[in-house]
Image (cartoon, grey):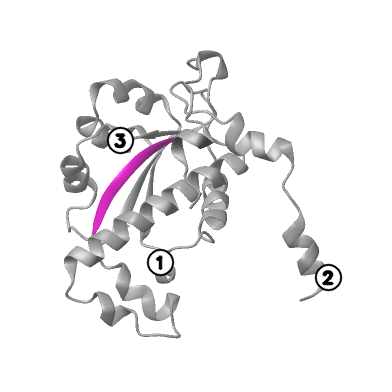
Amino acid sequence: MSETKDAAQSIKVSHDTLNQLFRQARTHNAWLPKRVPVEALREAYELARWGPTSANSSPARFVFLESEAAKARLVPALAPLNVEKTKAAPVTAIVAWDTEFHEKLPKLFPHADMRSYFVGKPALIEETAFRNSSLQGAYFMLAARAVGLDCGPMSGFDAAKVNAEFFPDGKWKVNFLCNLGYGDHSKLFPRSPRLEFEEACRVL
């Protein structure tokens, strides 16, 4: 292993970076009226796509709603408390999963026939796709924060209505929603506590 690789593995990211991604990052409900350029969405995806998934399956699919017309199609599926903040957000991402993700495995996992492992097994397809698209959605949020965006993930919506409106062919299915943009920090709620290591973790 080269000295360069050894050195790279030993470097810890800066406190400022950790603050931006974790400690000072917040779930935003109010947004500044500032457009998110599509280049920022592309940059976030280009980072997020490197996150690991089972057999490199990469089942997540992202639909970015930017226009008022697109948002209007989503509103009927939202829980009441999520309507206004979603309408105000510059972008709302539908983080979805592909029921046919295994068809891309010959490209994504060429050294073994993983496609045949999933064919005809809808329960395994759903379990694998939902779990790994959840991972990818989380990777995308961290990537979005890394490129200067704020995030407001949401689970208050009617999945059947979202799927019927945006994915009527049934090939993709919604996992969760995430508002994106530049948050209004003056309207943040007080930060809620988190569990301590001893409360949430076991070392065996």
Determine which residue is flagged by label 3.
155
Q: What numbered label is drawn on residue 54? A: 1
Towards the viewer: 60 or 88: 60
Q: CA distance from mark 2 to mark 3?
A: 45 Å
Please report the residue visible at 37 percent of the width from the left and 76 percent of the height from the top.
Answer: 105
For the point 53% across and 52% down, the residue is 42
Q: Decide: is 87 above or below 119.
A: above
Does residue 180 appear in this view?
no
Instruction: Answer with left or right where residue 35 lies relative to residue 133.
Output: right
* Spatial separation of the CA atoms under disc 2 and disc 1: 30 Å
The stretch of residues the image draws in magenta is: 172-180
Q: From the image, give the main secondary structure of the stretch colored magenta.
A: strand
- To which quarter of the image does residue 116 belong? bottom left
Taking 130 as reference, is 185 above or below it? Answer: above
The mark that comes first in sequence, 2 or 3, is 2
Question: Which residue is most to the front?
Answer: 204
Identify the residue shown where x is 45% and y is 85%.
Answer: 111
Does residue 175 belong to the magenta stretch? yes
Q: In the image, is residue 116 part of the stretch drawn in magenta? A: no
**Residue that mark 2 sits on:** 3
State the residue in front, 131 or 140.
Answer: 131
First reached walking from the N terminus: tag 2 or tag 1: 2
Residue 117, x across and y down, in percent: 27, 78
Regarding mark 3 in the picture, which secondary structure is present there? loop
Distance between mark 1 and mark 3 Cα atoms: 24 Å
Q: Residues within 10 Å of mark 1 (few under 14, many from 20)?
A: few
